[in-house]
Image (cartoon, rainbow, N blue to C red):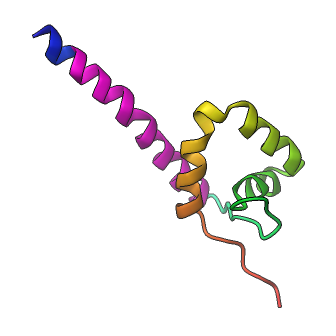
Amino acid sequence: MEADLKDLFHFACAIVPIALSFVFAFWARDRGLQRTKSRWLAGVCGGIAKRFQIAPWLVRLLCLFFIGISWMPYIIMWGVVPEEKSES
């Protein structure tokens, strides 16, 4: 019985961050967030900075500082959030 609860706890600890990352990515996409073309990797940090009108280096620094919790939402947002359209 105790082992079953421990397994359930470990499963919840693994699945909850993934689920919250997807919720955040779809929430951001629905509010108009777009990945920018001026990027270092995927344009996610640049898109967040542009959406909230702050410096991109600050968002990148925060992502690096919180790398333990920011890598999963970053990768999910890379796939979910659309790229900005070129104005040509």
Total label count?
0
Q: Nearer the viewer, residue 72 or 49?
A: 72
In the orientation shown, which residue stands out farthest toward the left? 1
The quadrant of the picture occupied by the N terminus is top left
Q: Nearer the viewer, residue 59 or 51?
A: 59
Please tell me whether residue 29 is drawn above or below residue 70 in the rendered image.
below
Residue 45 in magenta stretch:
no
**Is residue 18 shown left or right of residue 78?**
left
Q: Quadrant of residue 66?
A: top right
Image spot of residue 51 (x, y percent) = 77, 56
The quadrant of the picture occupied by the C terminus is bottom right
Please tell me whether residue 84 is drawn above or below residue 8 in the rendered image.
below
Image spot of residue 28 (x, y percent) = 60, 53
Inspect this view and state whether residue 54 appears: no
Image spot of residue 20 (x, y percent) = 46, 40
Q: Which residues are magenta?
A: 6-30
Instruction: Characterize the magenta stretch by its predominant secondary structure.
Output: helix
Please tell me whether residue 9 is drawn above or below residue 75 in the rendered image.
above
The residue at 52%/53% (across/down) is 76
**Is residue 32 shown left or right of residue 72?**
right
Q: Nearer the viewer, residue 68 or 37?
A: 68
The residue at 51%/55% (across/down) is 26
In the orientation shown, which residue stands out farthest toward the top? 2
**Is residue 14 shown left or right of residue 78?**
left
**Is residue 38 shown left or right of residue 33?**
right
Residue 23 in magenta stretch:
yes
Inspect this view and state whether residue 72 appears: yes
The residue at 60%/42% (across/down) is 71
